[in-house]
Amino acid sequence: MGCQIAQMTGFRSVEAAEFRLAMRNLAGGVAIVATGAGTARRGLTVSSVTSLCMDPPCLLVGVNSSSETHAAILASGRFGVSLLSRGQEDLALRFAGGAKGIDRFATAPWQQGVLDVPLLEPALGVLECVLHHHQLVGTHGLFIGRIVATHGGNGDPLVNFQGELRALPQAPPESSPIGRSKP
Ligand SMILES: Cc1cc2nc3c(=O)[nH]c(=O)nc-3n(C[C@H](O)[C@H](O)[C@H](O)COP(=O)(O)O)c2cc1C
């Protein structure tokens, strides 16, 4: 199923190369989205996690529908989000195809959380979600998760920008930001 509203406008879509070029400049945090327990655990690296709304508290994430994790989240109705930080670049690459299936979980410690979903320990932060809504958009499934538990950590966030993984240094306490994101 495509996006019917976009189809109705009559405008042609940009080509894949133009899409990639434009999206290179969208900096995004890097996370591992995972579900399942034991040998049924499945997960992948994403940069599409977005805070969606406060009431109810929801986030959204886009997952390729060809991924094993897509089917696993639909089956379980829940998922965990582990936010990555400096030093976890190898994990990001491992969960982006460097290993497959349950083997992806072999090189780091994982806890199961209150929803019995895999959460990286340590992580910059973890969020546990029950599936609130799912929608297919072209090649990807859009998952909206209602957040039922969180746990914060520490570290410099890992960011995907211009095709590279970079660590964003935490600002020292005395530094002045360019602008504040809260009024
Ligand atoms: C930094 C980074 C961000 C990514 N973001 C996403 C994403 O938001 N959604 C997605 O479906 N794949 C994303 N990918 C690609 C998947 O991690 C990769 O295709 C993975 O192998 C899919 O899992 P599978 O092998 O089970 O299909 C990203 C990869 C990297 C390295």
Image (spheres, rainbow, N blue to C red):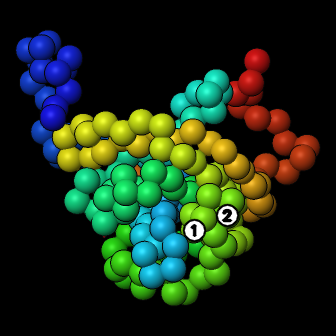
Is 113 left, or right, of 138 in this rendering? Answer: right
> Is 30 drawn above or below residue 133 in the view shown?
below
| Label 2 packing within 10 angstroms: few (<14), some (14-19), many (20+) | some
Determine the image quadrant of residue 86: bottom right
From the viewer's side, name the closer residue of 68 and 130: 130
- Using a 10 Å C-alpha cutoff, classify the residue at mark 1 as few (fewer than 14 neighbours), some (14 to 19) or many (20 or more): many
- Residue drawn where x is 43% and y is 75% of the image: 40
Q: Which mark is residue 113?
A: 2
SS of the residue at dot 1?
loop
Residue found 63% across the figure and 69% down from its top: 112
Q: Position of residue 95 (x, y in %)?
A: 43, 72
Quadrant for the N terminus in the image: top left
**Quarter location, residue 66:** bottom left
Q: Which comes sooner in the sequence, label 1 or label 2?
A: 2
Residue topped by disc 1 = 118
Q: From what the image shows, is residue 18 above or below residue 79?
A: above
Q: Secondary structure at mark 2?
A: loop
Q: Could you tell me the amino acid type at mark 2?
A: Gly
In which quadrant will I find the C terminus?
Answer: top right
Q: How far across and how far down the image is residue 181, in percent?
A: 70, 27
Residue 115 in view (yes/no): yes
- The tag on residue 52 is none
| Alpha carbon separation for disc pair 1 and 2 | 7 Å
92 left or right of 169 in image? left
> x, y (%) of residue 8?
12, 14
The answer to whether the residue labelled 1 contacts the one labelled 2, judged by CB atoms less than 8 Å apart, is yes
Residue at 54%, 31% (x, y): give it: 52
Tag count in the figure?
2
- Where residue 35 appears, x then y in whole percent? 48, 63
Residue kind at label 1, given as amino acid type? Pro
Q: Residue at x 78, y 60 (%)?
A: 154
